[in-house]
Image (spheres, rainbow, N blue to C red):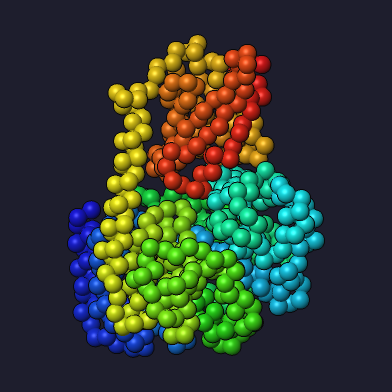
Amino acid sequence: MKKWKLSLLTTLAVVFTITEHTITYGQPISNLPAGVTVQQINDVVNRTIQTFHVPGLAVAIVNDGKIVFSHGFGNQSKEKKSGTVDTRTLFAIGSNTKEFTATALATLVDAGKLKWTDRVIDVMPEFRVSDPWITREFRISDLLTHHSGMELGAGDLMLFSHSTFTRSEAVAALPYMPFTGRFRADYAYNNLLYVVAGEVAAKVSGQTWENYIQKRLIDAAGLQACQSTPPVNGQIDVASAVGERNQLPDKNYLRQIAMAPAGGIWCSVDGMARWVQTLLNDGRTIEGKPIISLAQRDALWAPSALLPLPETASMTQSHFRAYGYGWFMEDFFGLKRIWHSGTVSGMVSYVSFLPEKKSGIVVLTNQDDNHVTYSIALTLSSLIATGKSEDWVEYWQQIGQKEQDKAKQERIKSALGTAMRPFLPLSSDAQKEYLGLYHDAWRGDIHITQQNDKLLLTFSKAKGLEGSLAALPHDLFVVKWENRASDAEDDSYVQFERNISGKITGFHMQVIGSDFSFDAQDLHPLKVSGETE
């Protein structure tokens, strides 16, 4: 790993010891925004790579209608022998997909086929939520603004964690989602409603979400190396967040992924930069081809749901933060800033606009650490806005360290598996009363089986979400997921329940960590049958 770091940093040093106006590869950068120099880009990229041990990333800057910087750095994966990242390397952009889904609806509004104020149930009669009045009042715009009143991350277990749910199955489970806030008043980030938005776009357009996004947005806008479906076998310029790139699926066996409208697009930094160009150009490509109207572009960028100010507000002179249709927005050193981040498959993306400066930034990484993208994007945004910047790399490094220290303290506090709170050995006979089939109203079947003197918990409609149960007193267990690389942060408590006769009737779960997308707290599986029934 040390050799790789030295090699990459040496390469960066060589690349950037050129004049400010040209670079040894990629596009000319003579029109960088005022306040930004090649050396400053070099410094923040270099320091970010070293500080956060980033395998690979790509950065693009758009200014005054032109892509003035677009470059890849490092490797496509943690594997030293993987290919290098270039400007056409595909990255999973995660929740930056939401802006595409919102834009797809905007094109249908432009075409007169939809209104933002249309009731969802009138467009999609099968739409239901837990409250009949909210079901009737739910508008198309309410799908996009995260202030429906649903709990943070409600339904994410149908979209992530190896889920094989279909979109229609996810929509059918909406009535079981908890409302913990006030409708159109309380903000809570939600992926499931963007899945519904994707289904609305499909129903109104008469095409699948994938086809409509690909043809009407990606192809129409000319987004190079960008696709609405996952990469497939034969594509080689693809980033991965694991040591070696996973075997890509065969194209003939691709299925529609339930979460795609909320986070399924893959794109290169060149493709995302052209997307930024198009939105900055009032919804038209640089060749003048209309993608969405200026009125609808502005509708996407208008505040709808107010958010609390972040801790960084004083550092960026921000007085408000809000969510529009697929975009965050805030005041930033007296300017309007539009942005969104995305995390999926161990990769993180970040897109940021300063429309009054006619500038935009794209950062794509293959490391599951949003401090990386924040460091680069906020540094470059600050330079464009003011000509100077806080040391955002150091700031986010300190924040990351505090988060790690807090998580460590929480583990110590829980004392799981220590002498203070040891796991209890359970005999094979004692384990048997927990065995059986359990059923949750929205997540479906969950099996508890016995294997090699261990209790195993397995979710249906999930390839690989299986974990062993370790016993604590009072029918409390901890499920430790077998796939430690991807699921370790989602280890959860499992609290079994008994009836007055002492028989196990069901259980509740609670994630031990802080992953809001593992919404196990909303599950209440009831026991359907036992081991011998």
Residue 393 shows up from this direction: yes
Residue 448 percent coordinates (x, y): 55, 25
Residue 149 percent coordinates (x, y): 62, 54
Left or right of 506, for residue 108: right
Q: Is residue 422 above or below residue 227?
A: above
Q: How many marks?
A: 0
Residue 325 percent coordinates (x, y): 60, 68
* Residue 56 position by quadrant: bottom left
Residue 257 shows up from this direction: no
Q: Quadrant of the C terminus?
A: top right
Left or right of 164, for residue 381: left
Between 298 and 208, the one nearer to me in the picture: 298
Residue displayed at 80% across by 61% down: 122
Q: Is residue 431 above or below residue 281?
A: above
* Residue 27 position by quadrant: bottom left
Residue displayed at 33% across by 35% down: 413
Residue displayed at 66% across by 73% down: 106
Residue 185 percent coordinates (x, y): 61, 60
Residue displayed at 57% across by 84% down: 282
Q: Is residue 287 above or below residue 247?
A: below
